[in-house]
Image (spheres, grey):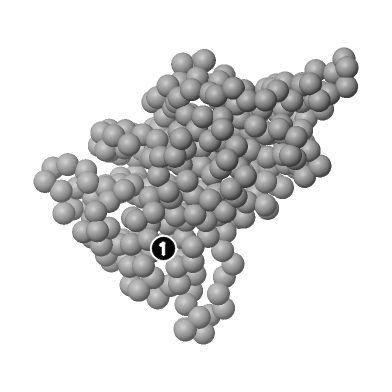
Amino acid sequence: MELVQFSDAREFRDRSWPLLLGREAENNLMVGIVGRLAEGAGPGSVGREGQPVFWAVEDRGGVEAAAVITPPHRLILTRASAQAVAFLAEELRRTGVELPGVVGPKGTADRFSALWSRQCARQARLTHALRIYQLDRVQPVATVAGRLPAGRQAGMEVAELKDFELVQQWNAAFCREAGVPTAATPERLRGLVQAGEMFLWKIPQPVSMAVAVQPTPNGIRVSGVYTPPGHRRKGYATALVAALSQRLLDSGRKFCFLFADLANPTSNGIYERIGYEPVCDFQEYDFVRSERNGDAALGAGAGR
C-alpha cells in the first residue's frame, strides 16, 4: 500500500472520484467538499484554519480508501478495510499530523479512532452516532396550512437578506442544540442566503429553517433543519423538508441526502415518513488529551 497526499482538490478529485461516486450517498460529505473546492471555492467555505489536505490509500494502482481534513474539522474517511485503516493511521501518525477527531462509516471510524487513541495517547470520545439517509421520491405529508387563521398563507420561501439576522440567530441555536462547536461564520451564512440556498417555512412569519448545501454530481444534501421551541410539534419542519426535497428533485437532482442524529428518534421518524431511506451509519469521534498524562479532558463537539 501507498499513501498519496494531495494539496490540490482537482487532482484529488480526478484520482478518487471512481471510489467516491461508487457510494455517492455514503460519501456525500466528502464528495460535496471536494467538489466545491475543485470548482474554485476558497478554503474558508469549508474550514477556518489552514488549507485542506487530501489523502488516497492506493493499492495495486487503484484507490482503496480516501481521507480529507478541512481544519479545524475532523478527518473524514471513506469506508475502508481493516488493513487500509491500520495503514492510514500509522502513516498519518508517522508524518506528525494532528487530528481533532474523525468521522466516517461506523466500522471504519471505530477502527481508526481505536488505533489513533493507542498510537497518539489520546482518548477517543464518541460525540455523535449518525445515520445517512437518501431520498429519490417525496412521500405526501400532511399540510400545515389548514391550521392557520383565515387569510394567512403558509409555505416555503427562499431566505432573503432581510432574514439574515434571524438566520444567524437560528443557526447559533441549532449549533448549540446539536453540539456543533464550529458554527458557520456570518460570511458563510450570508453567502448561503445570497446564493439562494437557505429556505424558510413561513405562516407568514418564519417558523422553520433548512439549507441545501454541497451538491454532488447526482444529489445534494439537506442540512441545518431547525425549528425554534415555540413552533415545534406543529409539522413545520416536516413540511419544509418535504417541500425543499421536492424542489431539489424538480431542479434535476436524482436524489437528496441528509444526516440524522440517532439520539433523536423524532427527526429520524420524520425523515422516513417523507421518503428518506437509511444508507449507512456514521460515527463522530473527538480525540482529546489523555487524562493519564495529567491533562484535563477537553469538551467534545460535533462540528462537521
Q: In this rendering, would 259 be left or right of 16?
A: right
Q: Position of residue 37 (x, y in %)?
A: 43, 35
**Disc 1 marks which amino acid?**
Glu
Q: Position of residue 50 (x, y in %)?
A: 47, 50
Question: Is residue 117 shown above or below 164?
Answer: below
How many discs appear?
Answer: 1
Name the outermost residue toward the left. 60
Q: Position of residue 107 (x, y in %)?
A: 34, 56
Question: Is residue 214 shown above or below 281?
Answer: above
Q: Nearer the viewer, residue 248 or 183?
A: 248
Q: Is residue 279 visible?
A: yes
Element carrying mark 1: loop
Q: Residue at x 57, y 70 (%)?
A: 298
Q: Splitting the image into 4 quarters, where does residue 39 fall?
A: top left
Q: In this rendering, would 61 be left or right of 57?
A: left
Q: Nearer the viewer, residue 134 or 51?
A: 134
Q: In this rendering, would 99 be left or right of 158?
A: left
Q: Residue at x 65, y 49 (%)?
A: 175
Q: Nearer the viewer, residue 237 or 251?
A: 237
Question: Is residue 296 shown above or below 100?
Answer: below
Name the outermost residue toward the right. 150
Q: Position of residue 56 (x, y in %)?
A: 26, 47
Q: Residue at x 62, y 51 (%)?
A: 178
Residue annotated with mark 1: 98
Dot 1: within a 10 Å radius of its alpha carbon, few (fewer than 14), some, or many (20 or more) residues?
Answer: few
Q: Is residue 192 visible?
A: no
Which image quarter holds the N terminus? bottom left
Question: Is residue 77 shown above or below 270?
Answer: below
Q: Residue at x 51, y 84 (%)?
A: 294
